[in-house]
Amino acid sequence: MPGPTLFFSTLMGDEAKSIARGLQKRDPDLLDRLIEQYQYRLFRYLVYVTGNRERAEDFFQETWIRVLERGHQYDGKSKFEAWLFAIARHLVIDWQRSKKAQSLDTLTDPEQEHPLQLANETDPSPLHQVLSQETQENVQASLQKIPAIYREILVLRFQEELQIDEMAGVLSVPLSTVKSRLYRGLEALRGALQGSAVL
Amino acid sequence: MSESVHDRALQLIAQGRVEGIAEVDGAWLRAHLEECEFCAAHARQTDRALRSLRTAVIPLPDGLASRTQFRVRLRAQELREREPKRRALWVACAVSWVFGVASAPYVWSLFQWLGQRTGVPKLVWEAGFGLWWSIPALFAVAVLLMESSRKGEQTDWINQGS
């Protein structure tokens, strides 16, 4: 008798395959359901990556338009959310490239001079406006201190609970890079929260 | 207690949260945390940091999903309207290629006959035949390739996510 892990992975595989079939046909009801189902997760991810609520809204809508247009390219072999986040991420990077005319490597490598930092750190805390609950003010203020590239990876791992190989797919980087960013991000988060006396 | 023992403990604390650790390492870490307040505090801070991240709430804008659904449906309608034109382009190209291949022997004979009648060198009417037959086909190929490359511009990066 198959174990529960196999059962759930088969169930998820069936779900992904059924999404892939629906996207092939551009099934409007399926798209409506997916938008409802993933709205919070996608919007949260975009807010963390862009650091700006209005921009996140624009990218949210653009992402779903792309899902409609390129849905036939999703084969159902991976989790739908990983594919969805990859689309959203590349839209953000494309926009950033067109604005700054920098190379993708420069944008995404935190060791370079210009890491992925869509939110201007000198502006009056756009992320803070989004994450405005009083009880969480310190936490959110601390999150702003972390470079976007680490915020993103922490969100994917600890909020979205993607596996490391899935994150490598979303970010288009090797597993070793994902791991090193996770370790650095975790340390940066701990340090930032400790610094603001949340911990 | 030596520095390296604490270093190992801190490394295992992070590794446990990021990718998991072996049971034997976990047992060692638990024993170490029971007797080392510094590393235990580090582990607690790490867990609290992750809890804070997990419980962070981002309010959704009003009507975001419904606005998006509306836009997506409009775009879907546009794509559906455009689909027959694209299909017609492919059908036209296919028909012209089939017709071109089928008629090639007759056109060749025609060029040959014209060449003999007008007395132009063989190489000239052969080149004429080549151009007559290949230019429309190359033009159609170019149109289709342009269409495909426009469609495929984002294909690579989208596939990276799957």
Image (cartoon, coloured by chain):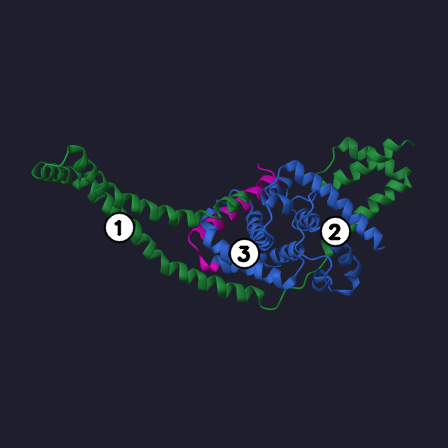
In front of the other: A148 or A194: A148
List x then y, in percent, for residue B54: 72, 53
* Chain in blue colour: A
Image quadrant where residue B23 sits: top right
In front of the other: B101 or A60: B101
Provide the residue designation for mark 1: B92
Gap in Å between the C-alphas at discs 1 and 3? 34 Å
Image: magenta residue range? A1-29
List x then y, in percent, for residue A39: 59, 59
* Chain in green colour: B
For badge 1, the amino acid type reads Ala
Provide the residue designation for mark 3: A63
B105 up-or-down from A87: above or below: above
Residue B119 located left or right of residue B44: left
For badge 2, the amino acid type reads Ile
Does the magenta portion include A19? Answer: yes
Q: What main secondary structure does the magenta stretch of the protein show?
A: helix
Gap in Å between the C-alphas at discs 3 and 2? 25 Å
List x then y, in percent, for residue B21: 74, 35
